[in-house]
Amino acid sequence: MEKRNILQRIFLFYYNGFKSMTVGKTLWTIIIIKLIIMFLILKPFFFPNVLKRNFKTPEERSRYVIENLTNTNK
């Protein structure tokens, strides 16, 4: 038996496991579709980049973040 690299063995382990799946392929397809919807479609609408929109330069952004992180008056 030939000695293989650890990365090759890990890759072959998962490759052979996914190749023999039946229901798992459908589940992984659903998971990937859900992740695409969450990150590519929902993220821009629910988590807009407020710092980039409200401040022009990186210095203004960093000053705003530092002030808000160190501000103890709530």
Image (tube, rainbow, N blue to C red):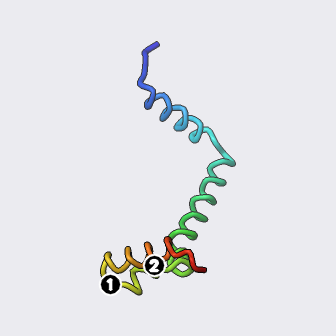
In this rendered view, identify the residue nearer to me: 21 or 3: 3
Q: Amino acid at mark 1?
A: Lys
Q: Amino acid at mark 2?
A: Asn
Q: In the rendered view, does 22 fall on the left or right side of 12?
A: right
- Which residue is painted at 56% across and 74% down in the image? 72
Query: Pointer 2: residues within 10 angstroms few (<14), some, or many (20+)?
Result: few
Location of residue 35 with respect to 56 vertically, above or below: above
Q: State the SS at label 1.
A: loop
In this rendered view, identify the residue nearer to me: 50 or 10: 50
Q: In the rendered view, does 41 fall on the left or right side of 59?
A: right
Q: Quarter of the image holding residue 18?
A: top right
In this rendered view, identify the residue nearer to me: 33 or 49: 49
Location of the C terminus (image quadrant):
bottom right
Q: Which circle marks residue 56 in the picture?
A: 1
Q: Horizontal and vertical percent for residue 42?
A: 56, 76
Q: Which circle marks residue 1 in the picture?
A: none
Q: Horizontal and vertical percent for residue 15?
A: 52, 38
Q: State the SS at label 2.
A: loop
- The outermost residue toward the top is 1
- Which residue is painted at 38% across and 74% down in the image? 62
- Which residue is painted at 64% across and 42% down in the image? 21
Q: Which residue is mark 2?
A: 49
- Which residue is painted at 54% across and 81% down in the image? 45
Determine the CA span between mark 1 and mark 2.
12 Å
Q: Horizontal and vertical percent for residue 61?
A: 38, 77
